[in-house]
Image (cartoon, rainbow, N blue to C red):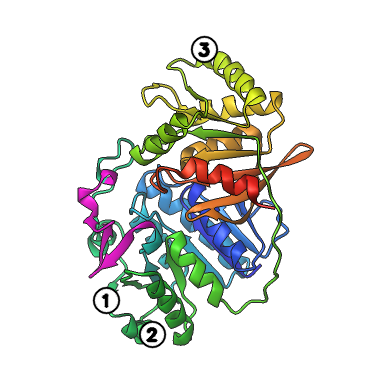
């Protein structure tokens, strides 16, 4: 195994896994290297986003050492597209392990409206601090200036590269253990960054969004396999624990179009009634939705996972669609799934994976809370039903 990635949440792990798979690299997403895999690449789902900085540092450092000892040549660190989580602490862990390599950070994701100019992140043209991501109830992100964000928890020297034509030389000259951050305002910028890394002749730790992982994976000097697995999923349960307003609008639009929806009750004692309601809906309709009310005082992700498991036991489903990284982790945990095989993106920013559940395989579609347009649920339904 020559390729690996580390992500701080489950949706992010599956996003980069899909990008690697689309580049012809068979990939598995799992919690650690110790999981037995038959693949060319491993994405470690570190689930470190909600940890404190010190715990996240230890988690990523441990994973990085495991991968280095295993001889992994090409390493990617997935970061959140709105700079949430413990990016500075996790970068410190990486430069502490890979002391001989520069870390190339490409935080832009232009296809999703995330651009970087002069080292500052903008979301659909607005500074990060002025967006709804800065008001996130669980994990607000307010610092959009990359150098300031890193300085708060990473001692490595940082160089900002605004002109991509200078990136190749910057990487050649960069000492091991430093962080090189480059701008990006359009998809070709991400491709230029990947090409500059290869042209520099340096073995780098790469970092960024799923948007940069695609171009990075395409330029790696690896043999490829070309295979597209046919997947359809006409009977699906949508489970959302995300409180992001974008997801709320997507679910609201699906409900307007007639898709049944159940809200997670305030008390876990009422969850069985929700299970039966969803099972009954899915016996009549091909798709149904489960969403958090946003007011439940109990652990939403684990409860949603439990509800999903009980519905799956009662109804023959083709697939699961899950919104939110914590929710995806909760669902996989409840189902007892330890490894997931990403296949590709079914829509931009929405990876399609395959999970093995007892004697059958299910499509497993995931999405970060802040991704996608208002018609996303209907688009997913059409894409999965017509993918032949």
Expressed as whole percent of the image width and height from the top left, the position of residue 252 reads 41, 32
Q: Callout 1: 10 Å neighbours few (<14), some, many (20+)?
A: some
Q: How far apart are the two marked residues, 1 and 2, measured between alpha carbons? A: 12 Å
Residue at the disc numbered 2:
168
Helix, strand or loop at label 1? It is loop
**Against 315, is 171 above or below?**
below
Residue at the disc numbered 1:
162
Pointer 1 with pointer 2, Cβ within 8 A: no
Q: How far apart are the two marked residues, 1 and 3, measured between alpha carbons? A: 55 Å
**Against 291, is 77 above or below?**
below
**Against 23, is 363 above or below?**
above
Disc with the residue nearer the chain's start (3 vs 2): 2
Expressed as whole percent of the image width and height from the top left, the position of residue 183 reads 30, 71
Expressed as whole percent of the image width and height from the top left, the position of residue 1 reads 66, 67
Pointer 1 with pointer 3, Cβ within 8 A: no
Helix, strand or loop at label 2? It is helix
Disc with the residue nearer the chain's start (1 vs 2): 1
Q: Is residue 370 left or right of residue 125?
A: right
Q: Is residue 103 visible?
A: no
Circle number at residue 269:
3
Region of the chain picked out in magenta, as a range? 112-133
Q: How far apart are the two marked residues, 3 and 2, measured between alpha carbons? A: 59 Å
Disc with the residue nearer the chain's start (1 vs 3): 1
Helix, strand or loop at label 3? It is helix
The residue sitting at 54% across, 45% down in the picture is 380
The foreground one among 79 and 116 is 116
Q: Callout 2: 10 Å neighbours few (<14), some, many (20+)?
A: many
């Amino acid at each position: 195994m020559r390729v690996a990635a580390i992500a701080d949440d489950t949706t992010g792990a599956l996003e980069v896994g899909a990008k690697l798979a689309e580049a012809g690299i068979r990939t598995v997403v799992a919690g650690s290297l110790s999981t037995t895999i038959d693949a060319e690449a491993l994405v470690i789902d570190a689930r470190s986003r909600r940890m404190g900085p010190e715990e996240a540092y230890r988690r990523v450092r441990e994973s990085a050492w495991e991968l280095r000892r295993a001889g992994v040549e090409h390493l990617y660190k997935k970061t959140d597209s709105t700079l949430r989580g413990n990016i500075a602490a996790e970068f410190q862990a990486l430069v502490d392990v890979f002391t001989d390599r520069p870390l190339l950070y490409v935080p832009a994701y232009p296809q999703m409206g995330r651009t970087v100019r002069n080292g500052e992140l903008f979301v659909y043209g607005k500074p990060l601090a002025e967006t709804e991501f800065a008001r996130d109830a669980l994990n607000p992100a307010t610092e959009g200036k990359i150098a300031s964000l890193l300085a708060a928890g990473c001692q490595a020297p940082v160089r900002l590269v605004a002109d991509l034509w200078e990136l190749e030389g910057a990487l050649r000259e960069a000492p091991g253990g430093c962080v090189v951050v480059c701008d990006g305002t359009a998809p070709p910028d991400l491709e230029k960054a990947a090409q500059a890394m290869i042209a520099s002749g340096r073995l780098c730790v790469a970092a960024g969004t799923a948007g940069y992982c695609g171009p990075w994976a395409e330029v790696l000097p690896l043999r490829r396999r070309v295979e597209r697995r046919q997947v359809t999923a006409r009977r699906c349960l949508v489970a959302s624990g995300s409180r992001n307003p974008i997801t709320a609008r997507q679910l609201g639009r699906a409900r307007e179009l007639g898709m049944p929806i159940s809200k997670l009750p305030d008390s876990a004692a009422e969850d069985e009634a929700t299970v039966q309601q969803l099972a009954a809906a899915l016996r009549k309709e091909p798709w149904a939705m489960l969403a958090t009310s946003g007011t439940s005082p109990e652990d939403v992700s684990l409860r949603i996972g439990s509800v999903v498991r009980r519905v799956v036991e009662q109804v023959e489903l083709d697939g699961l669609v899950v919104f939110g990284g914590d929710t995806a982790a909760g669902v996989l945990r409840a189902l007892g799934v330890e490894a997931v095989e990403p296949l590709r993106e079914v829509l931009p920013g929405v990876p399609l994976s395959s999970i093995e559940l007892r004697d059958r395989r299910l499509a497993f579609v995931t999405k970060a809370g802040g991704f996608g347009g208002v018609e996303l649920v209907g688009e997913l339904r059409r894409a999965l039903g017509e993918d032949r």
